[in-house]
Image (tube, rainbow, N blue to C red):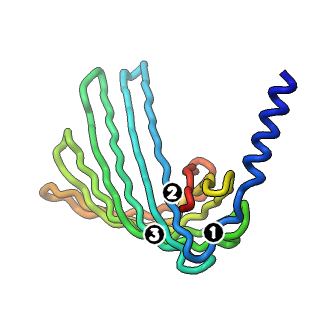
Amino acid sequence: MKKVIFSFVMIATAFVSNAQDGFSKGSKFLSGNFGISSSDNKDEVTKTSSFSVNPSVGYFISDNLAVGVGLGIGSNKVTVDGDTESESSTMSFGGFGRYYFSPKSKFTMFGHLGVNYNSSDEKVADFKTTGIEAFVAPGFNYWISNKLALEAVIGKIGYSTSKADFDGAESSSNFDFGLNLSSISFGMVMKF
């Protein structure tokens, strides 16, 4: 057993020690995250399920500054006693800029500024909502190989506005300030 553990540690060390030293001008990357959630409250006979995927692609215009575009797709469904209470699909797309504080390091911090157009289609109530959001978020990359890094974005500070398309609907706005450990988003980054 000790030989197996020792072999695993040696392979992992070799894998990590080959990590490259980050991004530089002209680098391109593909990043993103996905999420799947399901809950079943037996007392209230309520089931909730959701799915999201958020890919993005970026390009370094200088050693520290990257620009890019992103897309988000998701769905959410809530059933009570077997009847669908709400079912929605979401879509977003937009642009972003990132400033890396130490882009040639194995571990680096970045600031992410994004602007997105958001759209949601509520199928049960039969209405659509559209809006725009702008936000700033801190993040980190940790290189685990020559081309692959783990990414974490912690919360965000942002403003959004949206409006539904049914008669009498008024626009709403929201200010977010969430830089806490309950709103961490994990993903991967691939340099190409």
Mark 3: few/some/many CA within 10 Å (<14, 14-19, 20+): some
As measured in the structure, the alpha-carbon distance from the residue carrying label 3 to the one carrying label 2 is: 10 Å
Pick whichever of labels 3 and 2 is earlier in the sequence: 2
View extreme (right): residue: 2
Q: Which residue is mark 3?
A: 68
Q: Amino acid at mark 1?
A: Phe
Secondary-structure class at tag 3: strand
Q: Quadrant of residue 160?
A: bottom left
Q: Quadrant of residue 141?
A: bottom right
**Where is residue 45 shown, x and y percent of the image?**
36, 21
In the displayed structure image, the side of residue 12 where residue 74 appears, left or right: left
Q: Amino acid at mark 3?
A: Gly
Would you place residue 2 above or below residue 78 in this image?
Answer: above
Q: Is residue 184 visible?
A: yes
**Where is residue 165 shown, x and y percent of the image?**
17, 57
Residue for point 57% across, 49% down = 186
Q: Nearer the viewer, residue 76 or 190?
A: 190
Q: Which residue is mark 2?
A: 31
Q: Which residue is mark 1?
A: 23
As measured in the structure, the alpha-carbon distance from the residue carrying label 3 to the one carrying label 1 is: 14 Å
In the displayed structure image, the side of residue 129 where residue 115 appears, left or right: right
Secondary-structure class at tag 1: loop
As measured in the structure, the alpha-carbon distance from the residue carrying label 1 to the one carrying label 2 is: 13 Å
Residue for point 56% across, 56% down = 189
